[in-house]
Amino acid sequence: MKKIRILLVLISCILLLTGCWDKVEIEDRAFVLSIGVDKAKGSGEDSEDSEDGSQDKYLFSFVNPDISKAEEGKVNDFVTFSVQAPSYNIGITRLLQRFAQYHTYEHTKVLIFGEELLEDDVLLKSILDAFSRGHQFNSSMYVFMAHGKAADIFKIKPKMQSLLAYYITGITDNEKYAARVGKITLLDFTKQLIDNEGDGVIPSLDPHEDGLTSSYVGVIKDYRHIAHLNGDETKAWKWLNGKAKGGVIEIEEGNISVPLNYSTFNRKINLDKVEKGKIYLTYSLNTEGSTEEYILGDDLLDENKIKSIEVKLEQLIENNCNKFIKKMQEEYKVDILGVREYLSKFHPVIYENIKNDFDQYFQSNIIINVKAEVSVRRTGRVK
Amino acid sequence: MIRNNDIISPYQIAMIVIMTIVGIGIFSLPSQLAETAGTGAWFIIPIGGLINIIFINIILRLNNRFPHKTLPEYAEAIIGKVPGKILTASYAIYFLIVVAYEARVVNEVIKAFLLFRTPSEVIIISIILICTYAVRGGVECVARIMEVFFPLLFIPLLLIMIPGITDLDATNIMPMFYKLPSKIFISLPTLVFSFAGYEVLLFYVGFMRNPKKAYKGANIGIIFITVLYMIITIMCLAMFGVNLLKDTVWPLLGYVRNINLPGLFLERLDAVMLSIWLFTVYTTMVSSYFVVTYSLSKILGASEQKQFALPLVPLIYYIALLPDNIAQMNDMANTLFQSLGVILISIVPILLLVIAWIRKVRGEIS
């Protein structure tokens, strides 16, 4: 009796414990490091033959590390696979028809949208939904736009770094030293668009002879890419949104330029008054840093000199910001200054009144005053 | 193993309260509250806690009137034999549905995040069978499971939230008190449901040597849960912002999924989170399941509850598979728990207490 029991337990172990429906061996996984999404042009070679099939809307590019070139556990190269499809899920099935592995997105670092795709609000909305709804995607990947096609970005072989995705995350990490570098995760990007009813920004990646460069920001209005900010505007945007984590501001002093290295940049918004239907806001910008470039032999350790540098820096910041605000209110007519966020969070009663025609209100009835305060704290090793 | 003596300690009562209440709801609570209360979500939770403390004390008051007796026993003393049995049966049915619902939600979450191709049948049957195993061990076994799992669950749960703090934006919880009174009213059903589960005390306090000591444990349990819910809601709110939070089905899982640990030694934490969450659901299921088998044994006059555990498996499985999809499941759960749940948690204990008081029935004090 006892023997039969043991036998039964053993047999049921064999039957019950071996069946694993979701087993995927690590060799069968293709780790996708970056994803690029472009707008499709016509139907591609993968399109279904049936006539009533829907149109190809997207061109997906998936970047995988090239395992065939792996040496001693280090992967030295990457490969790109592209597929055209009406939606992400169809794209994947089409890709799997000519692919020996199964896609895994746990390690996806970068998501790049092509410019044309961003100009189409319906496509952008549905692909963003696919990436936030899909259980397989993580929301901490960085989002970028490409000037041109996202697929072209993946053709670039970076110097020094072997894998493009880690090269791009390396660039984003430099945000704390260079204010123009963009860094936004998928979660923050979707959050920003949902909170601002389709308005927001997206940092761009552009080809460079050294690889890639991230130094501009694209403006999105109503889920549509409408413009690109230039260098000064990008910096002004970061300052006004309190997103600057560090960088350099420089002024001209005689023939040389004097830079201020800052590592903190604080922004505070205050509601001054509401008068005759107009809302007066003050943006107080506060930064401090060190100046470590001047003229040899000239003494920088002088209260008056530092004061004058500070005043010039403050004027520069204020001018830049004012120009930027004016452009946003008059030309682009889009609130990427955080006005909506501030009012809805801290003055919900006011916001409730103007919520319905906020765009109109933003253009004419919100008056923003910028006040910068710069302190040069240190001047380096030389007097 | 020491043989059961079927006695529960006051500490175990606190554990039963905590582990029963914290269940599937912990994943979706922040988004449900954001839907009804907006940014005031986190502030509404203490109000919910306060309301539930009142009801839990009513239940304890009732239990203290009949020391060493559980609901099936004293219900018969208060309202008569047959109505008492009917009342016990309605509790049994309610908890049976709770177990089935939890099993179904486990299945939905696991299928969405972990095991995509594993058949639902396998997932549901295995979780029910594991619960059956625990329930067959009797009341002391159930209480010990709660006791053992408590640190295993909450220490990692709080630890796992910490790396996400860098991504939080504290201003997302503003505006704080905007239109709060109207929000409280529409959030009440969610709040009642998310604290539901302590009605199991109607059964468990009867196993205590000194039921007076249950007051402390049970109240501490509710306060602990209130604080835990507040922490989770504040963190999710700060991470997602109110607009995105409303649209998220399982925000706590999304929170963990958004964490990017530097150093890459653990790339994704959501698998850890899911296993913690499975513990919470498991404990809720076990404690409800025991109430079902125990009630059945009392209704049928059996001396042991053990033999009722296994035959219930197909029934629970069948009920779990009734809803067609998640949307339907949520609808059914909301209507059922918000009507039957509210009656069984609040109204029935009050009525029983009042009737017992009028008829001057009370248990023997030993």
Image (cartoon, coloured by chain):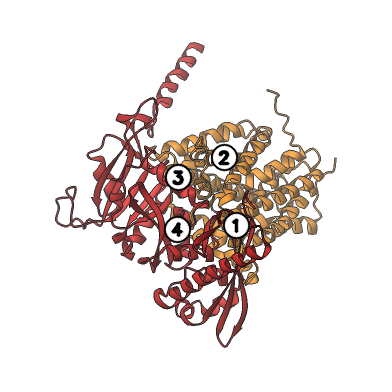
For label 2, count other residues whose C-alpha is less than 10 Å away and answer few (under 14), some (14-19) or many (20+): some
The verdict on a common chain for dots 3 and 1 is: yes
Q: Nearer the viewer, mark 1 or mark 2?
A: 1
Say if A65 sits above or below A378 in the image. Answer: above
Q: Amino acid at mark 2?
A: Ile
Q: CB atoms at circles 1 and 2 under 8 Å apart?
A: no
Nearest to N terminus: mark 4 or mark 3: 3
Q: CB atoms at circles 2 and 3 under 8 Å apart?
A: no
In which image quadrant can residue A314 be found?
A: bottom right
Q: Quadrant of the N terminus of chain B?
A: top right
The residue to which callout 1 is attached is: A298
Q: Is A181 in front, or is B282?
A: A181
Say if B13 sits above or below B60 in the image. Answer: above
Nearest to N terminus: mark 3 or mark 1: 3
Tell me where residue B332 appears, x and y as whole percent. Answer: 49, 56
In which image quadrant can residue B141 be found?
A: top right
For label 4, count other residues whose C-alpha is less than 10 Å away and answer few (under 14), some (14-19) or many (20+): many
Q: CB atoms at circles 2 and 4 under 8 Å apart?
A: no
- Measure how far apart labels 4 and 1 are at the Cα level: 47 Å
Tell me where residue B226 appears, x and y as whole percent. Answer: 68, 53
The residue to which callout 2 is attached is: B276
Q: Residue at x 37, y 39 (%)?
A: A163
Q: Amino acid at mark 4?
A: Phe
Q: Residue at x 61, y 56 (%)?
A: B234
- Measure how far apart labels 3 and 1 are at the Cα level: 38 Å
Chain coloured red:
A
Furthest residue to the bottom?
A276
Q: Nearer the viewer, mark 4 or mark 1?
A: 1
Residue A170: image tag: 3
Q: Amino acid at mark 1?
A: Asp
